[in-house]
């Protein structure tokens, strides 16, 4: 006999019974304190990431088929095996106005169901995604960046996700598009303060091999240090350390939440994002 089919939930049912956010969590290696308490973080669960990116995938592929959805409500979205499916939504001709409307509707659904209208708990990288969806210009011009947004990438895929963009920015563009390369580097965050953000997390300090008198403080040094730390994240692992590669990716994600999203955004502006096929890592 075959396995019983998985149950299908409405979006409201699924978000009511499935945790969407980890709240007030202390990270491995974190020693920083505020008013005597360790700094704690909020971040999406892997279930929430899967749900959100499959909703965005549904919208993206309708648009790729030169159509739009006439109107999207939360009652049109069902969830099976953690993945979203649209049912009973009428389609119409693709137009910029409708593209923007679709993303505004999805934004409203996210806020009502996943985030429960509680914007103060939403992580910075997720807020970046939501801003892209609610700006007419970026909703229309950055559909691929929205669909593949870094905040929704599984932890196990973040290293490869970063490396694809890193190689494009630091290896390919300097040769093929030096002007675009320069603009992207100038636009990326953390150029002036990345080394400060390492302080207080013993794992980051060790893997970035940061020294207080280190003068290599520009964006190129940061990208190279991030690459090296990511590639060698388990080199000094020993029994009892108590962390995994995914744990380390989580630390990077909450410490430098805007790096990968801004790399995506700037590559999209330069027309060099889609060729990386980042959707294969979602």
Image (cartoon, rainbow, N blue to C red):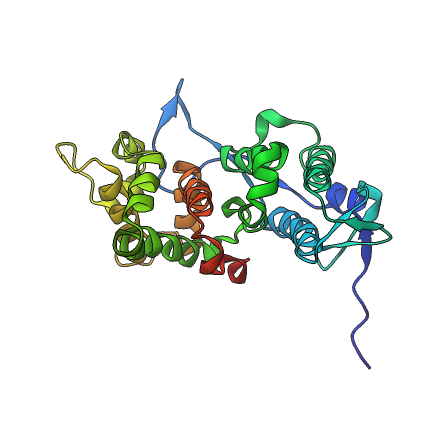
Q: Residue furthest bottom?
A: 1
Q: Residue at x 81, y 57 (%)?
A: 8
Q: Is residue 65 left or right of residue 212?
A: right
Looking at this view, is 165 or 79 the one in front? Answer: 165
Q: Is residue 226 visible?
A: yes
Q: Is residue 240 visible?
A: no
Quadrant in which the C terminus appears: bottom right
Q: How many marks?
A: 0
Up/down of 58 relative to 108, above or below: below
Q: Quadrant of residue 120?
A: top right
Up/down of 278 relative to 37, above or below: below
Where residue 15 sits: x, y (%)? 73, 43
Where residue 281 sits: x, y (%)? 51, 60
Up/down of 17 relative to 124, above or below: below
Q: Is residue 3 left or right of residue 33?
A: right
Q: Quadrant of residue 191?
A: top left
Q: Residue at x 50, y 37 (%)?
A: 125
Q: Residue at x 74, y 37 (%)?
A: 105
Where residue 139 sits: x, y (%)? 61, 39
Where residue 115 sits: x, y (%)? 67, 34
Looking at this view, is 20 or 112 the one in front? Answer: 112
């Amino acid at each position: 006999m075959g396995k019983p089919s998985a149950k299908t939930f409405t979006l409201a049912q699924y978000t009511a019974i499935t945790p969407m956010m980890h709240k007030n969590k202390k990270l491995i290696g974190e020693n920083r304190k505020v008013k005597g308490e360790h700094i704690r973080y909020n971040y999406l669960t892997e279930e929430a990431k899967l749900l959100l990116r499959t909703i965005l995938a549904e919208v993206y592929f309708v648009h790729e088929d030169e159509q739009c959805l006439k109107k999207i409500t939360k009652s049109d979205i069902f969830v099976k095996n953690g993945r979203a499916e649209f049912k009973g939504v009428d389609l119409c001709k693709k137009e910029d106005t409708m593209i923007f409307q679709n993303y505004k509707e999805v934004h409203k659904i996210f806020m009502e169901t996943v985030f429960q209208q509680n914007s103060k708990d939403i992580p910075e990288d997720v807020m970046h995604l939501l801003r892209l969806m609610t700006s007419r210009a970026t909703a229309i011009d950055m559909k691929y960046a929205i669909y593949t947004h870094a905040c929704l990438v599984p932890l196990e895929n973040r290293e490869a996700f970063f490396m694809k963009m890193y190689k494009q920015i630091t290896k390919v563009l300097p040769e093929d598009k030096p002007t675009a390369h320069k603009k992207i580097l100038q636009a990326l965050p953390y150029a002036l303060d990345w080394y400060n953000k390492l302080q207080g997390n013993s794992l980051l300090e060790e893997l970035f091999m940061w020294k207080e008198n280190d003068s290599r403080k520009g964006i190129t040094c940061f990208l190279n240090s991030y690459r090296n730390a990511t590639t060698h994240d388990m080199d000094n692992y020993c029994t009892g350390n108590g962390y995994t590669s995914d744990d380390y990716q989580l630390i990077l994600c909450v410490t430098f939440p805007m790096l990968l999203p801004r790399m995506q955004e700037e590559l999209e502006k330069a027309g060099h994002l889609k060729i990386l096929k980042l959707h294969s890592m979602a």
